[in-house]
Amino acid sequence: MAEFMQSSAYAGVTISLIAYAVGAWLKRKFGFGFFNPLLISIVVTIVVLVGCNVDYDTYNEGAQYLGWLLTPATVALAIPLYEELELLKKNAKAVIIGVLAGVLTSLLTVFVMAKLLGLSHENYVTLLPKSITTAIGMGVSEELGGYVTITVAVIIITGVLGNILGEFICKLFRIHEPISKGLALGTAAHAIGTAKAMELGDVEGAMSSLSIAVAGVLTVVLSSVFAGFM
């Protein structure tokens, strides 16, 4: 299997897409939150690689092409935002305050957790960009001296948990306003949370898309400040 993946330029992409398709099918079939397509695709891919004794570098040779689509996919989230531009203008103040509150909460949570658990500076800054999209978070982690690969894993875990639990938490705290739900999902769980927001409605999706960009910029600026706290 390892030899096949080394000789095939698209083996990694194929495995990734099939694994994601399995996750999407399970989500449609059972509708259970933990059957998140991304989570399932990660598990299936790991099982295939371990079972076939294929190392990550060999797999990534073919799968890296998917990574090239990450940035344009993130930029494409501006489309639903454009469609709800008038709504954004009417609620600009609430949007800015809401996203800022979400970013500060995320950074403060990481700081308090790092203090309580006695994490090193490197581990601390690795976790700071946990709630922003991978394309931005990797750069923040590298700039601050964190472990980029761990940052990527943490960002994915944060997004998947937000996707799975976001709607439940909104119901638990009786948050019914579409703008509020969209801002919460986008700020806390970046693009993966935005996928859930789009399932909830057009307004939720648009506000969540906006939150990704604003939260990313604010996190870049504020992470540098918080990094000096430890």
Image (cartoon, grey):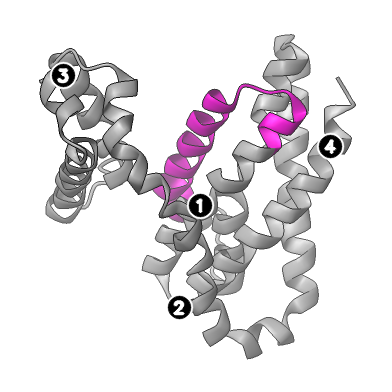
Residue type at mark 1: give it. Leu
**Whether residue 130 is visible:** no
Q: Seen in the image, is 152 located left or right of residue 40?
A: right
Q: Is residue 25 above or below residue 75?
A: above
Q: What amino acid is found at the position of numbered circle 4 in the picture?
A: Ser
Position of the C terminus, as image quadrant, is top right
Which residue position is annotated with label 4? 224
> Mark 3 or mark 2: which is in front?
3
Residue at 41% across, 45% down = 67
The tag earlier along the polypeptide, 3 or 2, is: 3
Location of residue 11 with respect to 85 vertically, above or below:
above
On the image, the x and y values in percent for residue 56 come to: 32, 21
Does residue 68 belong to the magenta stretch?
A: no
Sooner in the amino-acid sequence: mark 4 or mark 3:
3
In the rendered view, tell whether residue 168 sits above or below residue 73: above
Q: Secondary structure at mark 2?
A: helix
Tell me the magenta residue range: 140-168
| Secondary structure of the residue carrying numbered label 1 | helix
How far, Cα to Cα, is label 1 from label 3?
A: 47 Å
According to the picture, the residue beneath numbered tag 2 turns out to be: 202
Residue 148, image quadrant: top right
Tag 1 residue: 172
